[in-house]
Amino acid sequence: MDDQQRKLAEELLFSEKKSPSFARLIYFGIVDPSTIFPYPHPTIEDKEKIDAFVLRAEEFAKEHIDGNKIDRDAAIPDEVIAGLGRLGILGMTIPQRYGGLGMSQYAYCRTIEILSRYCGATALFVNAHQSIGLKALLLFGTEEQKQQWLPPLARGECLAAFSLTEPNAGSDANGIETRAVFDIDKHVWRINGRKQWTTNGAIASVLTVMARTEIQTPEGKQDKITAFLVTPDMPGFQITAASLEKVGMRGSKTANLEFHDLEVPAENVLGPIGGGLKVCLTVLDYGRTTFGAACTGAAKYLYERAVQQAINRYQFKRPLGSFALVKKKIGMMGAVIYAMEAATYLTASLIDRQCEDIMLESAILKVFASDKLWDILYDTMQIYGGRSFFTSEPFERMMRDARLNMIGEGSNEVMRVFIGAVGLRDVGLELKAAGAALKTPFSEFGQLTNFTGKWIQRLSAPTIPVKSDILQPEARQLGKEIRRFGLAVTKALIAHRESIIERQQHLDRLANCAMAIYTAMATLSRLDSSIQNAPEPSLALETETFTGKAYCKIASEIINNSLEGLNHNYDNEIEKLSDRLTGIRFP
């Protein structure tokens, strides 16, 4: 990362003063349980309304959404889109004053979970429209913009898209080359450039488009990204590919676009001029949370099918589920899905509670849920054996669909580096400040005292506030692991300083730890809530307890292996071998 990239990252990610989130604090070895415990639940009244809505959505999906046909035809039928609009799904999170249902992120994730069981492409279509397509308008739009666009978007009369990716700008959003120049005489922005892989791009009536603009800053003129509301009826808007052939998610329409002197009225700027990347990052937090719900829904369906096969399929005169390796697959699936669901709705609740910073939590959820869905797909297909290889089962379609989850809205490799690096940043600044204070200890005595006090606090394991006695062993173990993680973060920063950013295998291990800690904490909170709220013991609660405790063991193993790998690895040998094989020498 060069100085310009580092400066941009600081400006985008850390320029606003926000209360540190749970995920940021664990890098210090500190636990702030306030957003995690008790596990968030909707009110009884809200839950009844949400349950009824989700039931209607499921009845609609069961009757009208044929995932295999949508995949074969590479199209979602118009009547399905219209039906989603009539149900209110396309405007679930839009406030009622703009014609939407004004429902919570929790309710929205529940609905996406149902849709993804029937068709990943349909869930993606809704996500592209609502989670990112219209979300920038909802969060950053002026009142006039909202009044104009949100009511028809809520009804499904028109659709929304989010257009960011370009031939030379994928995960590196700052690589955008599309440029907007202000025409002072016409009072319009003139946009030229290309966009690719825009979901809903050819069917949307309004698109949030990112373009590079020149603005005046205290350091002089600089290029900054700005968000614009663009409509396809504007002269210069060209669809070069309306529906690209894809490996999976074939029912969704993915378009390539070009802009040739596209004239966009000045009042169509979305958010502040030069603030487009902030718009982008904020919107993606919502999209990544919804990814978690979609992956959870698909995983639950696969788990149910895998269990059925393990029970009903006999080989060697015994059910498949009686073999140890199949038991391992079923047990791991059940434990991991419990954690996926716990983390999904915990993260959704952070949005509903308007927490200031969910950047790390949403990134963790996206990577964790998409990776685990892929594992569950593999295990389900192995349990089905040869039957899974034929199109009479939906598994091959779901496998093709699932590939996108690990690439879209930030590839999982990029996101792992992001999770590791963002978490390290605040710890690094504290160490840097302490190092500077040591040079003038008398004048900086207060800061040194504060730093020392924090470190004394970190020498003991943080307390995880579970109320259930049966969960105390897992809570104590997780506290010890958070302490070890915080110390390992500090040790890595002292050893490598700023060069840690290039040690991506270390960042990957730290990200693995952060994901395991967050999902284990969500699991413990959810399970503790179930135990505390249960009117009496039951077989279902006993199974849930067994499931949640099993995931805590899985998470503990991941944390221990990752921390061990920081000190004992063959990273250099693997990277040197790669350089020999590719011939690349960088830097």
Image (cartoon, rainbow, N blue to C red):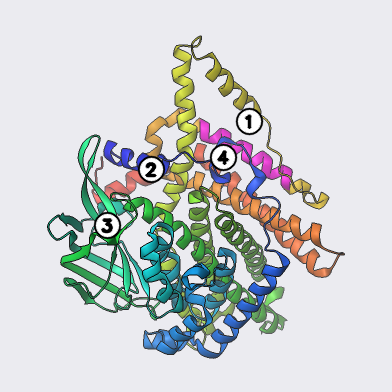
Numbered mark located on residue 169 in the image: 3
Distance, label 1 to label 2, CA atoms, is 34 Å
Distance, label 2 to label 4, CA atoms, is 33 Å
Q: Between disc 2 and disc 4, whose residue precedes?
A: 4
- Residue nearest the observer in this picture, 407 or 222: 222
Distance, label 4 to label 3, CA atoms, is 31 Å
User: Residue 577: image x %, image y %?
Assistant: 33, 47
- Dot 4 and dot 3 residues touching (CB under 8 Å): no
**What secondary structure characterizes most of the magenta part?**
helix
Give the residue type at disc 4.
Leu
User: Residue 220: image x %, image y %?
Assistant: 20, 37
Q: Which residue is mark 4?
A: 25
Q: Which residue is mark 1?
A: 458
Reply yes or no: does residue 487 show up in magenta: yes
Distance, label 1 to label 3, CA atoms, is 41 Å
Q: Which residue is mark 2?
A: 573
Magenta stretch in the rendered image: 475-490
Q: Between disc 1 and disc 2, whose residue precedes?
A: 1
Q: Between disc 4 and disc 1, whose residue precedes?
A: 4
Query: Who's the residue at 31% across and 61% down the image?
Result: 164
Reply yes or no: does residue 52 show up in magenta: no
